[in-house]
Amino acid sequence: MKAAKPLELLANLCLGVGSALILIWAYHAHARKTAAAPDPAVGTSLSVSSIDWRQADRTIVLVLNRRCPYCTASAQFYNRLKPAAASRDARVVAVFSDDLDQAKEYLSSLAVQVDQVVAVPAHTFPTSVTPTLIIVSRESKILKIWKGKLSEDAERAVIDSL
């Protein structure tokens, strides 16, 4: 009977280690499948099937998240951005990884008006930083990128680059 105790402990230890290894393998396999796309770069194409880049000379893409305090803090700038964009043949599109209705409700609560709201799975869009502002040409080429809460100088640069 005394030999059974150490043998039982060894068997339980092996089961525990084996289970942990299987869980680690499953986690890494899942992470590889859901890894975010690489960050966007100026000069590359941005592909979002629900956005028609040809609708305007430039499209300003706002990558936002309802739970992002910097997105909320940027709302005043986004309110100024829409009229400035409209006067320069540019559209403003908000991209969320959230549910579309919740995204629209969030924008409405901030009184932010955009031309289009798009919901895309987070792992398919090429940035995880919010807020991110991307200016895209009619040909879907990325012209400029800004990340994070913008300073007043950076906000002016965005308007000037339209």
Image (cartoon, helix red, strand yellow):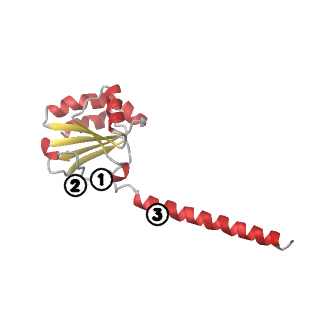
For mark 3, what is the residue?
29
Mark 1 or 3, nearer chain start: 3
Circles 3, 2 touching at the beta carbon (< 8 Å): no
Spatial separation of the CA atoms under disc 3 and disc 2: 28 Å
For mark 1, what is the residue?
40
Mark 1 or 2, nearer chain start: 1
Indicate the quadrant where residue 31 lies. Answer: bottom left
**Residue 110, horizontal then vertical, whole percent:** 34, 27
**Residue 73, horizontal then vertical, whole percent:** 38, 31
**Residue 41, horizontal then vertical, whole percent:** 28, 54
138 and 154: which is toward the camera: 138
Circles 1, 2 touching at the beta carbon (< 8 Å): no
Q: Secondary structure at mark 2?
A: loop
Q: Secondary structure at mark 3?
A: helix
Q: Nearer the viewer, mark 1 or mark 3?
A: 3
Residue flagged by tag 3: what amino acid is it? Ala
Tell me what residue is drawn at x 36 percent, y 44 percent. 97
For mark 2, what is the residue?
45
Tell me what residue is drawn at x 71 percent, y 66 percent. 12
Spatial separation of the CA atoms under disc 1 and disc 3: 24 Å
Q: Nearer the viewer, mark 3 or mark 2?
A: 3
